């Protein structure tokens, strides 16, 4: 499945959404041996962030996914290669990007020894960087990102987003990923001292 996703073609279209901010973006996938496009994910306002009193985009299942199925590989700009995950998370480049508001930094195990630090800020479809952490809500993560950067469903079934339902009714379709304590520890430091000062252009 991973090889097929890697070789996929992607397309997207804006769809009117009368139950929330419109439009929403449907992302479609066509596999290497298929003539058919199928809905894959949907980018829309996050129901999770709404519950937390914030506004921002989230990622929803565009079709039903079940446990063990892969959605794609986390992509982004390569920031650097490091011997350990800790070295990647504490590198000066990481601090610099964090201070500039880059919040989509992920470490993935590289093909050789060590880890790559990726900045998913401008990554394209299937927009896995849009998946939010349910921390602060009673919701549990329904997807995980493997050490190699693959996002897969980790429990049960994730139903497809429906344009006939409002955001709260679609919350079980939102892809939720536990970013981990390392991520939140880094972001907690922002603005606490000169080393972690927030930069504003």
Image: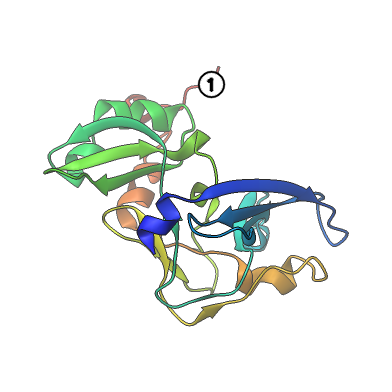
Residue carrying label 1: 200
Q: Check the image and report above or below for 7 versus 76.
A: below
The x and y percentages for residue 98 are: 41, 33
Q: Is residue 73 visible?
A: no
The x and y percentages for residue 8 are: 49, 51
Q: How many marks?
A: 1
The x and y percentages for residue 44 are: 69, 53
Q: Residue at the far bottom: name it.
A: 156
Q: Residue at the far top: name it.
A: 201
Q: Is residue 201 visible?
A: yes
In what element is the residue under mark 1?
Answer: loop
Q: Residue at x 40, y 45 (%)?
A: 188
In this picture, residue 140 sits left or right of residue 171: left
Q: Which of 194/136 is in front? A: 136
- Dot 1: within a 10 Å radius of its alpha carbon, few (fewer than 14), some, or many (20 or more) residues? few
Q: Residue at x 67, y 47 (%)?
A: 12
The N terminus: image quadrant: bottom left
The C terminus: image quadrant: top right
Q: Residue at x 48, y 54 (%)?
A: 32
Q: Quarter of the image holding residue 68?
A: bottom left
In this picture, residue 191 sits left or right of residue 52: left
The x and y percentages for residue 40 are: 59, 60
Q: Quarter of the image holding residue 92?
A: top left
């Amino acid at each position: 499945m991973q090889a097929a996703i890697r070789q996929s073609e992607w397309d997207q279209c804006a769809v009117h959404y009368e139950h929330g901010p419109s439009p929403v973006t449907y992302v479609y996938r066509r596999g290497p041996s298929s003539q058919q496009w199928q809905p894959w994910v949907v980018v829309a306002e996050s129901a999770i962030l709404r519950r937390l009193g914030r506004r921002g985009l989230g990622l929803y299942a565009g079709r039903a996914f079940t446990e063990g199925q892969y959605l794609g590989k986390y992509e982004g700009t390569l920031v650097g290669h490091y011997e350990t995950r800790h070295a990647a998370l504490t590198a000066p480049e990481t601090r610099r990007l964090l201070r500039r508001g880059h919040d989509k930094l992920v470490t993935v195990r590289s093909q050789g020894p060590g880890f790559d630090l990726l900045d998913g800020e401008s990554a394209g479809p299937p927009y896995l960087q849009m998946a939010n952490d349910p921390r602060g809500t009673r919701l549990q993560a329904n997807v995980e990102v493997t050490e190699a950067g693959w996002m897969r469903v980790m429990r049960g079934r994730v139903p497809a987003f429906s344009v006939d339902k409002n955001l709260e009714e679609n919350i079980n379709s939102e892809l939720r990923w536990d970013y981990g304590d390392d991520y939140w520890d880094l972001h907690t430091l922002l603005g606490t001292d000169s080393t972690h000062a927030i930069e504003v252009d």
